[in-house]
Image (cartoon, rainbow, N blue to C red):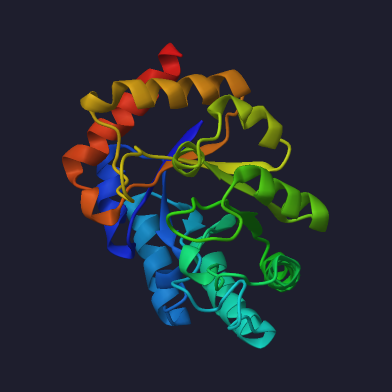
Amino acid sequence: MLYGLCVPLDGFSLARDAGYDYVEFPGFQVAKLSKAEAERLAAALKDAGIPCRRINAYCAGTPAIVGPAADDGATRVYAETLFENAAILGAECVGIGAPAARRVPEGYDAARADEECVRFLKITASVAQRCGIRVLLEAVQHEMCNYLTKTPDALQMAQRLAIGNLGLVVDLYHMAKEGEDLDTLPTYLPLTRHMHVSTWETGLRRRLFAEADAQQLAMCAAAIKKSGYDGTLSAEPDAKEISPQTAKTGLALLKAALADA
């Protein structure tokens, strides 16, 4: 198992010092970099001795994945910039959660939304393929968006497309918030290329695990261990919840829980 931390672009030293194996940067920040800026960041990561293996937070609402603002041209232009920069950073996979980009008006035609999502993923995966990167679709809980909120729905979409470089990132926070059974993880393993964990509570807050979260942590660790998953696992807290101490403690507790599960 490789352990990562989702951090802003300036957070890689903190993640390294806390003992993580890699960092996971927000896509909406990576997409804003010029080629020169991406190359400087890649050099800084190399000097720091910590790689960027994964990218999350695909976009900040634009391009839209579904809905009236969905636009194939905008999808392609954004993907070309993001994946070129992601390749420079050495990222292997880019996750597509992006809740702000997958909100549809009440009563929006479900079949139309599905077709928009299909086009988005085909275009995005095609661009990613040229850069040697996998695209990972993620279910995002209903308090954040209203399209593909459950993991079985994300799995069905990925299976429908059957694109070689399209897989899943499975997020136990979103599963828990949707009331999904964490013991269903083996169902998704054939297409799972990455996992996220964090605490869950009332509202949208996500934290790194602390001593007070022993019950939730034990549930996550038991489900992951039972499933047999041993790939990359990133802690994905809200950025404001990350500090040198919470990052270090969260990693130590996660490793210990998985060892004991």
* Residue for point 49% across, 53% down: 142
Looking at this view, name the residue that lies furthest to the bottom. Answer: 73
Given residues 152 and 112, the one toward you in this image is 112
Counting from the top left corner in percent of width and height, residue 102 is at: 55, 67
Counting from the top left corner in percent of width and height, residue 43 is at: 39, 65
Above or below, 145 against 177 in this view is: below
- Residue 37, by quadrant, is bottom left
Q: Can residue 241 be seen by looking at this rendering?
A: yes
Above or below, 195 against 93 in this view is: above
Looking at this view, name the residue that lies furthest to the top. Answer: 260
Counting from the top left corner in percent of width and height, residue 56 is at: 48, 57
Q: How many marks?
A: 0
* Residue for point 21% across, 39% down: 246
Given residues 183 and 77, the one toward you in this image is 183
Counting from the top left corner in percent of width and height, residue 105 is at: 55, 73
Given residues 191 and 141, the one toward you in this image is 141
- Residue 77, by quadrant, is bottom right
Q: Is residue 203 left or right of residue 62?
A: left
* Residue for point 40% across, 71% down: 29
Q: Is residue 255 left or right of residue 242?
A: right
Q: Can residue 162 be seen by looking at this rendering?
A: no
Above or below, 252 against 117 in this view is: above
Given residues 185 and 239, the one toward you in this image is 185
Looking at this view, name the residue that lies furthest to the front. Answer: 107
